[in-house]
Image (cartoon, coloured by chain):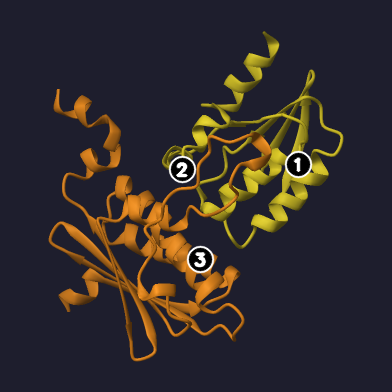
Amino acid sequence: MWRDQDRVELSFPAVEVAASAGLANLSAQLAARGLPQERAGDVKIALAEAINNVVEHAYAGMEPALVQVECRFGPNRLDILISDTGRPLPGARPPDGEPASVDTPLQDLPEGGFGWFLIRQLAKDVRYERRDGSNRLHLRFDLRCADATALGHNKAQIRS
Amino acid sequence: MSLTSTMHAQTQVITVNADRIDAAMAIRFKEEMRVETESAPDRVILDLTSVQFIDSSGLGAIVASMKQLGGNRRLELAGLTPVVVKVFRLTRMDTVFTLHPTLGDAIAKCAG
């Protein structure tokens, strides 16, 4: 029975409103399983972007099926698998996620294109595979030294 | 999604009465912002105190809302919660917008 405590699973239709509710549900369940609050924000941001990509791109132009999310707590880490039966990622690999530049005139500021950048910034490891007609995106989050990781840019301050 | 506007001297404060601005509400947010700012004064502050979460679609909608103010007018943001701040910092949008810790701070600035 211990496995139940370490796992959170949810599937929902790949449409915006269901995805929004699904993400809130997953976040609440992860918090209830003890995901530290400092890491909960990072996980939620990355998970939201991964789910949005499925909703907006994988099922674009076709009948949306389900997004399945499976989260597993391991020693000092959280592994999340997001799967769907939509189109494969172009090039069969997750984009590098170069961020759009904000050093532009106001009217040229980017209004999108940050999804993969955020995922790559926040997850420790990102892997993708296409298997049996499904997309499987694996995100790993490091839960060690949660305080230091959460503060990131303030590491020097923590050491002192 | 629901927005409320109040005037403080020559400053319009638009308060977001929702706990998130995400892909499911980004288009509606942008449209409601267009209506709220149709005859806006030069200074507009967006009060995000209630917003616990935004994703990149929500961020994009806030950027779009600033663009539709017209000219070179910049939207100021107040009351950003930790996850919202993180999204602005990671994307460097914190260098584009003026961020105020609280709505009170933002309004105090307009008096000066």
**Residue A96 drawn at (x, y percent):** 36, 58
Mark pair 1, 2: CA separation: 21 Å
Name above or below for residue A93 compared with residue A45.
below
Q: Residue at x 79, y 19 (%)?
A: B10
The colour with which the image depicts chain A is orange
Q: Amino acid at mark 3?
A: Asn
- In the picture as drawn, the residue positioned furthest to the top comes out as B112
Q: Residue at x 46, y 68 (%)?
A: A51
Between B100 and B90, the one lying in front of the other is B90
Q: Residue at x 33, y 57 (%)?
A: A31
Q: Amino acid at mark 1?
A: Gln
Name above or below for residue A18 compared with residue B35.
below
Name the secondary structure under disc 3: helix
Chain letter for mark 3, please: A
On residue B68, which mark appears?
A: 1
The image quarter in which residue A33 lies: bottom left
Q: Does the residue at mark 1 contact the one at mark 3 (Cβ under 8 Å)?
A: no
Residue position for label 2? B91
Chain letter for mark 2, please: B
**Residue B41 drawn at (x, y percent):** 81, 26
Of marks 3 and 2, the one in the foreground: 2
Quick one: label 1, few (<14), some, or many (20+) residues within 10 Å?
some
Q: Earlier in the sequence, mark 1 or mark 2?
A: 1
